[in-house]
Image: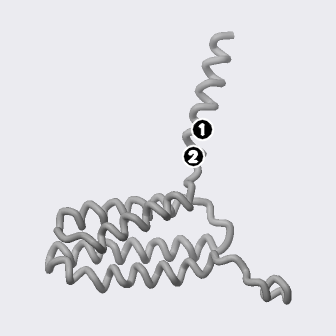
Amino acid sequence: MKFLVIIFALLFSCNAFAQQEVDLEVNMKNTGLAYKDAVQATGIGGFNTAIDRFIELVETSKKAKFHKEAHMSRQGLDKVIEQAKLAKKLANERGLDAAKPALKNIDNLRKKYHELHEPPGFFDLLFGN
């Protein structure tokens, strides 16, 4: 009997760890804060800390369950990570000002890919577009 209890406990604990879902809303808010910290950084150390945290959070977002356009969303997150890594490389090689264009690209990508997840407007619902 003890053996069965141990097996069930192990199965349920493994299953609980395997299916931890990413709270995308919370994760994205934290990602936004890390991005803001990177943009406002005044030193390379603070920038690297913020951009590393940003990249980590975006990687976590890729594991989330997207309800529509999942492939496109993950593709956008990959592009964001690519720009963040470029920003870090440029900042470390040439200084923080050199990273600004890549950081701006991240914001542009955010705007573009967030459009995929906007709720339909009133007229879209009314006329079925």
Residue occupying the point 28% across, 72% down: 40
- Considering the image in quadrants, where does the C terminus appear? bottom right
Q: Residue 45 at what x, y percent from top left?
A: 18, 63
Q: Residue 20 at what x, y percent from top left?
A: 57, 46
The answer to whether residue 32 is above or below residue 115 is above
Say which amino acid is labelled 2: Gln
| Residue corresponding to mark 2 | 20
| Residue corresponding to mark 1 | 16
Q: Dots 2 and 1: beta carbons under 8 Å? A: yes
Residue occupying the point 30% across, 69% down: 38
The structure's colour scheme is one colour
Residue occupying the point 51% across, 82% down: 111
Question: Label 2's element?
Answer: loop
Q: Residue 71 at what x, y percent from top left?
A: 59, 73
User: Furthest residue to the left?
Assistant: 94
Q: Residue 110 at what x, y percent from top left?
A: 48, 78
In the picture, residue 34 is in which quadrant?
A: bottom left
* Position of residue 90 in the picture relative to residue 101 (left or right): left
Cα–Cα gap, marks 2 and 1: 7 Å
Say which amino acid is labelled 1: Ala
User: Furthest residue to the top?
Assistant: 1
- Considering the image in quadrants, where does the N terminus appear? top right
Within 10 angstroms of label 1, few (less than 14), some, or many (20 or more) residues? few
Within 10 angstroms of label 2, few (less than 14), some, or many (20 or more) residues? few
Labels in figure, total: 2
The answer to whether residue 122 is above or below residue 54 is below
